[in-house]
Amino acid sequence: MDQDLNDLRAFATVARLGGFRDAARVLGKSASSLSDAVRRLELGLGTRLLNRTTRSVVPTEAGRDLLGRLEPALEEIRLALDVVNAHRDKPIGTLRLNVPTSATRTVLPAILPAFLAAYPDIRVEIIADENFVDILDSGCDAGIRYEERLAQDMIAVPIGPRVQRFALAASPDYLARRGTPQHPRDLLDHACIQGRFPSGVVFSWDFERDGEEVRIVPNGPLIVQAGAATELAIDVAIAGSGIIALFEDWLRPHLANGALVPVLEPWWTSFSGPFLYYPGRRLVPAPLRAFVDFLRTQRYDDSLVDLRTAADRPPS
């Protein structure tokens, strides 16, 4: 076969993701170069592999048959080449992580500089995404999520602070004008800056104190999408437009300099910290293996949690 391996990989990625633009993002190439690669492959094989429209890219029957055989072979090639990394003093390659935006502010800044210094031949690529995605389909090696959002077939490694809190805050000017809430239900009479998941669901705000639990859905003049517009929400809160609820670690610089003031702090809820997660398989890419080993040297709880069922786990 004289088909270029890169062309085969381009076709497999486009077919799996259903579009040239998403495949280009995953592969770090232009959509036009991937289109050229697929066209060369189709010309060499003498058959159409993808049906293209302005809205979608769908494999033909021949394309589906090729993809079914090709993806396992490409994975084996990748793992075979990665074995060479075991013979290096320092592993090389790219580590792609799918993470929520909050992790880019509250977790990774304390970890990545030291990791990059320790492994100068590893390039880390961060994809900030609030959706819970299939990390393999998205072209990533691992992700960061919280425990309640982890699939049961994943290995999970603690990363970052093991306990975090949701904090409420407002500017001194806002509180001087509107008064300071004394109970979570008082928030129903305040301007609250709301967040929305990409799914469209608006955040509820949960509180707990001395066994009393309260959940409210606040009202306010602004709703922002989680992650993408969070900094805007903070700026609006600092400007005095309302009360904001967010990770305490994210708000801490503004609380420290007095731009924001804590609200209802005795009611703030705590939750367990995030995890790095990846598929439970024997052969882990060398850059990911190096990152996991690095996390185990950190000062927080470094136990490894196996979220697979016993039947799925490889023999020890």
Image: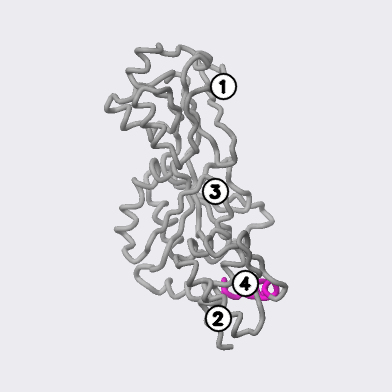
Q: Amino acid at mark 3?
A: Val
Alpha-carbon span between mark 4 and mark 2: 22 Å
Residue 219: percent from left, percent from top: 53, 22
Alpha-carbon span between mark 4 and mark 3: 27 Å
Nearer the camera: disc 1 or disc 3 = 1
Q: Amino acid at mark 1?
A: Ile
Point out the stretch of residues depicted in magenta: 63-76
**Which badge, 1 or 3, is on the more N-terminal residue?**
1
Vertical placement of residue 197 versus 22, above or below: above
Count of all numbered marks drawn on residues in the image: 4
Q: What element does badge 4 sit on?
A: helix
- Asked whether 224 or 226 is in front, the reply is 224
Magenta stretch: dominant SS? helix
* Residue indicated by mark 4: 72
**Which badge, 1 or 4, is on the more N-terminal residue?**
4
**Which badge, 4 or 3, is on the more N-terminal residue?**
4
Alpha-carbon span between mark 2 and mark 1: 57 Å
**Which badge, 4 or 2, is on the more N-terminal residue?**
2
**Residue at the extreme left:** 257
* Residue indicated by mark 2: 40
Residue found 48% across the figure and 25% down from its top: 221
Residue found 31% across the figure and 32% down from its top: 253
Residue 315: percent from left, percent from top: 62, 62
- Is residue 73 magenta-colored? yes
- Is residue 274 magenta-colored? no
Residue 272: percent from left, percent from top: 50, 36
Q: Which mark is residue 305?
A: 3
Nearer the camera: disc 2 or disc 1 = 2
- Asked whether 238 or 123 is in front, the reply is 238
The part of the image, by quadrant, that contains residue 117 is bottom left
Alpha-carbon span between mark 1 and mark 3: 33 Å
